[in-house]
Image: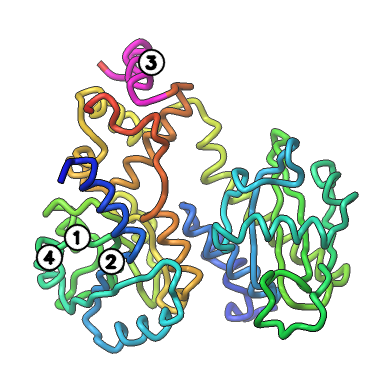
Amino acid sequence: MTSAAAVPFHAGPELSRAINRTDFFRLLKAAAQHYNFANFTLARISEAAAPFGEREVVITNVAERRMSLFVKTLKEALGTAKARTAQFLTTPVHGKSAAIEGYPSDLVFNEFSGSTFLFIPLFTPEGRRYCLVLSGQRQEPDQGEVADVLLDAMRIFDKLYEEILTQEMSGRLTQRETEIVKWTSEGKTSAEIAIILGLSEHTVNSHITAAVRKLDAVNRVHMVAIALRNGLVS
Amino acid sequence: MSGEDETMSAEATRRNAVKVLFVDDEFIEFRSLKKKIADLSEPRVDVEYSQSIGDALDKVKASRFDLILLDNRLLPNADFRETVPELRGIGYTGPIGVISTDISGNYFQEFPDYGVDFRIGKDEIDVQTLQHIIREYVTYDVPDFWKDDYSA
């Protein structure tokens, strides 16, 4: 493969450029489309509600109110045994959910019925378990295609780990987070901090969420108290 | 109307229709966007159009927008490093996404420093992507227990 045009979007330069969640949405969507899957969901594996519940979803193109149906149909496609043991899987598995017979497909309530589901286990270097689930109205993939999807999923997940998950696990505040904690300690609201720093309120809230988690705080006041106690802001 | 009622009414409006401002010097791009998202009903989206950053600034001052989609290159020769700080400078704190046919320039990697929330290729925009953007940046939930509780 010598032509740059032959490299699919999700495996090309955009992969090395990805830095935020929307960039990863773009990559995963492109990867799913490349392999003729309509839907994708990246989620943390849940031991309590294997393979995962709605709260564990990290990035998806499945509408929020359709997610429980997506997970239910995934379990049905993989079979109860595989779905329950998904948290222990190390290699991809796939299955097809039964189509509802006798009704036109556009009138069927569950748009995932009759879909092929591909479940790809993913791991962080610390051993935290995630999975990428792809689904679509297509035939089940053969071993070669599963291997290709697995490799692409691992590459995207590695980059996600590097750019986002390590940040989430790190206990150290970034320069921007410290700046926002400092303004919070001055009594400023998210909207006020957004105006001061020329950012969106969403960005400010994301930084506060990250700082709350990193400092092991329970709310903003607690976050400021910990930051003051630890000398992170004066 | 009490403050609480006003908040509830604002939230209800937000749920009903997401107001998007699309800024691009080519009107045909606006028509193309409208066509691409014609099927989007969940949530309902109202898109307004501005042909220049000056017009966008006037519109943002005059009414509330939940999201701005901004073409990277606007006449005469401004890119997001000039246009987004102008929008932030008038106090707009909603999400801003920069769209372009080519987002491969190295300077695009600096987009968070200029108040941009995300970047996206023009050909990548469709119903699913817009739904993701709205869920991620417009209708996201801030946990109640750490809202601006100290200022209440």
Q: Earlier in the sequence, mark 4 or mark 2?
A: 2
- Segment tinted magenta in the rendering: A219-233
Mark 3 nearby-residue class (10 Å; few <14, some 14–19, many ≥20): some
Residue at mark 1 to residue at mark 4: CA–CA distance: 12 Å
Residue at mark 2 to residue at mark 1: CA–CA distance: 8 Å
Report which residue position mark 4 lands on. Answer: B57
Residue reaching furthest top? A229
Q: Is residue A13 left or right of residue B43?
A: right
Percent of width and height locating residue B105: 38, 67
Task: Indicate the amino acid at tag 4.
Answer: Leu
Q: Can marks 3 and 4 be said to lie on one chain?
A: no
Image color mode: rainbow
Question: What's the residue at 24%, 73% (across, down)?
Answer: B23
Residue at mark 3 to residue at mark 2: CA–CA distance: 39 Å
Residue at mark 4 to residue at mark 2: CA–CA distance: 15 Å
Q: Earlier in the sequence, mark 1 or mark 4?
A: 4
Report which residue position mark 2 lands on. Answer: B19
Task: Indicate the amino acid at tag 3.
Answer: Ile
Residue at mark 1 to residue at mark 3: CA–CA distance: 36 Å
Residue A226: numbered disc: 3
Q: Can marks 1 and 3 be said to lie on one chain?
A: no
Q: Earlier in the sequence, mark 2 or mark 1?
A: 2
Q: Main secondary structure of the magenta part?
A: helix
Question: What's the residue at 71%, 40% (across, down)?
Answer: A46
Q: Is residue B130 left or right of residue A30?
A: left
- In this rendering, is residue B140 above or below A233? below
Task: Indicate the amino acid at tag 2.
Answer: Lys
